[in-house]
Image (spheres, rainbow, N blue to C red):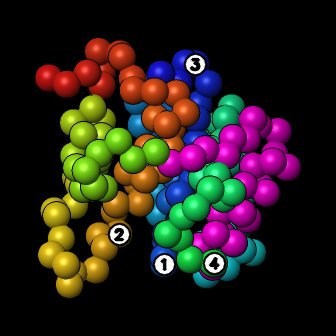
Amino acid sequence: MTGKQPVLAFAAASGRVAHVLVVKDSIKSLGMSRKASMGPEEARAYAAQQIEQLRPGIVIAENLRTPSKKGAKTREIIGALRSVAELADVESLAVVRSQAHANRFVEAQDLARRYPTLRPYLPKPRRLWDPEPKTLIYFEALSLIESTFGTPQSSQTRPQ
């Protein structure tokens, strides 16, 4: 899927920003920050720190030019994340997040099957009145990588 270059994806949702680093079809790092969701300045600091620490070859964030259910503040934060990636010495990609599953919970189950590292973060389907699980953001970031590079074919991530 991603080849030899480490690929870092950022995702943002209300109240959180997350990153997932994939190297050779394996998740090497993931993390979430509430502080980064406070505004563009905090998001830029988070992105700069992750890029500096993780040294990816490619950075991916959601394409803001497409229709989205994300609010104005979240869209601002995604723009800030992308601006840091564009200034860094890495390839920066804006990706349209595709939805090939019935919903995000089904997508998360499919991703957790291929990436066992994410199994502890797999949310249970929520009832209509429940808040969205915070860990769903990891699956959103990983789906941006798969939207770009496709599904991995290595034996590490193949269904068992």
The label on residue 134 is 2
Horizontal side of residue 91 vs 13, given as left or right: right
Q: Which amino acid type is shown beneath numbered disc 1?
A: Gly
**Which numbered disc, 2 or 3, marks the residue closer to the eye?**
2
Q: Are marks 3 and 4 in contact (CB under 8 Å)?
A: no
**Which numbered disc, 4 or 2, marks the residue closer to the eye?**
4
The label on residue 4 is 3
- For mark 2, give the secondary structure: loop
- For mark 4, give the secondary structure: helix
Magenta highlight on residue 113 = no
x, y (%) of residue 59?
A: 66, 42
Q: Could you tell me what secondary structure mostly forms the magenta stretch?
A: helix
Report if residue 142 is visible in the image.
Answer: no
- Spatial CA distance of label 2 from label 1 is 9 Å
Asked which quadrant contains residue 155, the reply is: top left
Extent of the magenta region:
73-97
Q: Are marks 2 and 3 in contact (CB under 8 Å)?
A: no
Q: Nearer the viewer, residue 44 or 100?
A: 100
Please report whichever mark, 1 or 4, sits nearer to the chain's N-terminal start.
1
Please report whichever mark, 4 or 2, sits nearer to the chain's N-terminal start.
4
Horizontal side of residue 127 vs 118, given as left or right: left
- For mark 3, give the secondary structure: loop
Relative height, residue 21 to residue 18 (above, below): above
**Which numbered disc, 3 or 1, marks the residue closer to the eye?**
1
Horizontal side of residue 42 vs 68, given as left or right: right
Q: Quadrant of the C terminus?
A: top left
Q: Which amino acid type is shown beneath numbered disc 2?
A: Lys
Which residue has dot 1 on it?
15
Q: Which amino acid type is shown beneath numbered disc 3?
A: Lys
The label on residue 72 is 4
